[in-house]
Image (spheres, helix red, strand yellow):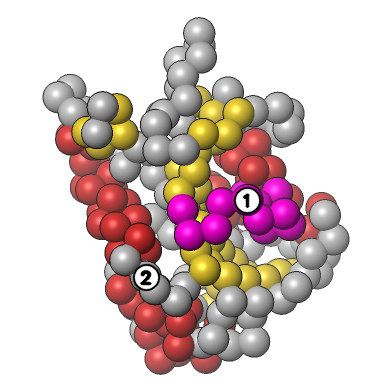
Amino acid sequence: MSITLIGASGKAGSRILKELTDRGHHVTAITRHPEKVAKLPNVTSIQGDVFNKDALISLLKGSDIVISAVHFTESDPRILIDAVKAAGVKRYLVVGGAGSLEVDGVRLVDMPGTPEEYKAEGTKGGVFLDMLREEKELDWTFLSPSGMFLPGERTGKFRLGGDQPLVSENGSSISFEDYAVAMVDEIEKPMHRRRRFTVGY
């Protein structure tokens, strides 16, 4: 498979890139700063601007799979979705946020007590998810992390869920490393086509 990862130098993107290469995949890594991409085998780093749709289309052409790991507040979902479709990409996976997960039909970002600093990102993530759900032709998957999304260890031991947050006796959390495992598992053996799912301990 030809895999392109947008946002390959970020916190989630860098872990996904490592997981992909550890499993032998060849990856084109698109980022604003290619020099920040980890030096890993089978990785081609290219500078790209997520707001330049025409340039993005050119970079994505020939990809079987595109993964978007950019912050919602630092990108435009319409540009990303349209670029992926125009490039003829077969499958699109998005690093989602926890804010769009729901409890009793209410998104976490809209619940009382949600810290103000999370609201902009969480709200835009919900907009992105809603746009994907309206897509008629794109084969997409949106993977939401748990409430706490932090650096940690790759254990390979976690739970998968749907639209509700996963909570354990230690709260709601997932490491970037185990999130990457779940994402690459979904690439290799798709089980959540045209839907959102979540991962947590």
Residue 186 forms part of the magenta stretch:
yes
Q: Residues within 10 Å of mark 1 (few under 14, many from 20)?
A: few
Q: Which residue is mark 2?
A: 135
- Is 113 left, or right, of 196 in this rendering? left
Q: Amino acid at mark 1?
A: Met
The quarter of the picture where the C terminus appears is top right
In which quadrant of the rendered view does residue 188 lie?
A: bottom right
Among numbered discs 2 and 1, the one appearing first in the sequence: 2
- Is 62 left, or right, of 85 in this rendering? right
43 or 87, nearer to the observer: 87
25 or 135, nearer to the observer: 135
Q: Amino acid at mark 2?
A: Glu
Please give the name of the residue rendered at 70% of the width and 27% of the height, measured from the top-left corner: 157
Please give the name of the residue rendered at 48% of the width and 59% of the height, measured from the top-left corner: 194
SS assignment at label 1: loop
Q: Which residue is mark 1?
A: 191
Check residue 146 in the rendering and tell me which mark sits there, or answer none: none
Please give the name of the residue rendered at 49% of the width and 43% of the height, measured from the top-left corner: 197
Indicate whether 79 appears above or below 11: below
SS assignment at label 2: loop
User: Residue 37 at what x, y percent from top left?
Assistant: 63, 62
Residue farthest toward the front in the current orientation of the protein: 136
Tell me where the magenta segment starts and ends, as one range.
183-195
The quarter of the picture where the N terminus appears is bottom right
150 or 186, nearer to the observer: 186
Inter-mark Cα distance, 2 to 1: 18 Å
Residue farthest toward the top in the current orientation of the protein: 169
User: Residue 155 at what x, y percent from top left?
Assistant: 73, 28
